[in-house]
Structure formats: structure tokens, C-alpha cells
Image (spheres, grey):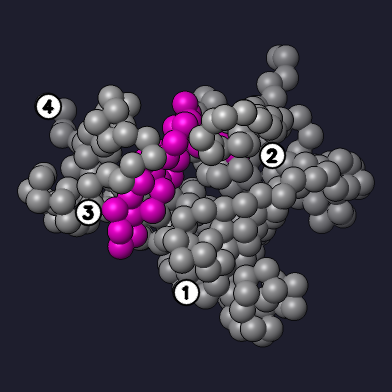
Amino acid sequence: MVAAQPLHHRLAAEFRARIASGRWPEGEQAPSEAQLCEEFGTSRGPVRQALATLRAEGLIVGGQGRSPVVRRNVPSHSASALGSFTAWARAQGREPGQRTVLQARVPATSDIAERLQVEVGEPVLELRRVRTLDGAPALGETMYFVWALGRRLMEFDPDSGSVNRFLLDAGADLYASTHQIDAVAATAEDAAQLGLPDGAPLLRVRRTTTDAAGDVVEYGEDRYVPGVTTVIVENRLFAAPSQALRSVPVRRDA
């Protein structure tokens, strides 16, 4: 006998269907957590988990203490390399992995304090990992979190999978992020971790994540191995705001 799917999985599937059918129109508010709990006769836990899944997939924004809003121009796939690496990799049929280099509470340097909008010396969580695709190094990942989130992440095993997924499931408010993209030369540390020669070109993505109130909660920097991904920029006249950046995996011939 096949076991029934967890309730939050079934709720997430129902919510996706409502967005796809237009029952929850793009750009409009979806029902609140309280309304959904009443409609489905359940507690807030499964509803929050289902909404967190849709936020991670880019289908809704908000939903922490207010009604979620269905995104305009809903993306056709669940995530990009500029968001959840784990979700992006799996959407491309690849197997993501990770090896933790560092997970520690550290005092904020002047640079990190400025980026996170905290005081110099204030505790933050520093997390460094090497991410892999099908077992091969794909990028070096460095993240800094304000301590309110960092405290939660001290309970998380970074070798186990997606940081975004863990935080969203824990109810963290990861409302929006901005990205700066450029090219840099691999440092000696990059080269050793990623199996590249010193000075090899890397695609660098610097990310700042804010909550619904606009407060910075995370700063991250990802350095991609050449040939892993290509970033495409789309410009549209007279279109509603959309996800302007997406990533496309680069596949090498066998």
C-alpha cells in the first residue's frame, strides 16, 4: 500500500494548480494563512510549509504575517542558480552536493558589517561550502547571516542540503534578493577547493537578501567554475516586472 503524501505536499500541489489555472491571479493576493487553515481544516504548520515551498519555487512572495502575493510572469521552472542551487540543479536533471568548509559564529568585519547593516564586531554566522554537480566541483559558496538567522542555522548540518530550504521550512522571512554579477580570477583558496589553476576565470555572483521589511538578513558570494552556467538577461518593453535574470546550465559533450 502506498503511503499518502504529507499534507503540506498536497497543499503545495493544490496551490500550484490554483496559480496555473488563474484562480489565484498573478499580481494579486492569495488567501491568508488563516483563511487557508479554515478552508482546509488544518493548523498553520502545513499551510506555512506549503507556502514556503511556493516561495522557494518563485511562485509567490511574502506570506510572513500577511497574505502572500502571486508573482507576475511566473517562471516556468522552479528556481535559478541565482536562488536555490539545489532546486536549480535538480530542475536540470543534475545531482547537487556540498562539502562544508566552515560553519562558525564570527565577529562582523567592517566590510560584512556594512553589507549586513550591523555593528562591527557583532556576531554573524559565516558558512563556506564547495557545491558540486554530479560529484564535480561547481562553485565555491560563502554566506554571512545576521545572528537571528545564524542561530537557527547552527542547528543545521550544511552537508545535508539546501540552506534556503531549511530556513524557509523554519519560517524565515527571505523576501527578496539582489545580485551583482562579474568575473574574477581564482584565488589560491578558490583554486585548491575547485580544482582549478591559480588565476582561472570565475563567474562571481554577490547576493544580498532582505526580509519583507527591507532589512538585510544575508550576504553571499558564489564563485562558479567556468562552463557550469550561463546567465541570460531579458529586457521586455511594456511588460510587468519579472524575474530579469535566469541561469542556463552549460552541458559539455560526453
| Residue 108 image offset from top left, x and y in percent | 67, 78
Amino acid type indicated by mark 1: Ala
Mark 2 or mark 4, earlier in chain: 4
Query: Between marks 2 and 4, how big is the CA–CA gap?
Result: 40 Å
Query: Within the magenta stretch, is there residue 57?
Result: yes
Residue topped by disc 2: 138
Query: Between marks 3 and 1, how big is the CA–CA gap?
Result: 23 Å
Looking at the image, which residue is at 12% across and 27% down? 1
Image side of residue 70 versus residue 183, left or right: left
Amino acid type indicated by mark 4: Met
Mark 2 or mark 1, earlier in chain: 2
Part of the protein shown in magenta = 53-81
Between label 2 and label 1, give the one nearer the viewer: 1
Q: Please state which of residues 251 and 36 is positioned toward the viewer in this rendering.
A: 36
Between label 3 and label 2, give the one nearer the viewer: 3
Mark 4 or mark 3, earlier in chain: 4
Q: Please state which of residues 213 and 182 is positioned toward the viewer in this rendering.
A: 213
Looking at the image, which residue is at 27% across and 44% down? 30
Asked whether disc 1 touches disc 4, contact meaning CB atoms under 8 Å apart, the reply is no
Query: Within the magenta stretch, is there residue 147?
Result: no
Q: Is the magenta stretch mostly helix, strand or loop?
A: loop
Residue topped by disc 4: 1
| Residue 227 image offset from top left, x and y in percent | 76, 29
Between label 2 and label 4, give the one nearer the viewer: 2
Q: For numbered disc 2, what is the local secondary structure?
A: strand
Asked whether disc 4 touches disc 3, contact meaning CB atoms under 8 Å apart, the reply is no
Residue topped by disc 3: 33
Query: Between marks 1 and 4, how big is the CA–CA gap?
Result: 43 Å
The count of marks equals: 4
Furthest residue to the top?
Answer: 254
Residue topped by disc 1: 148
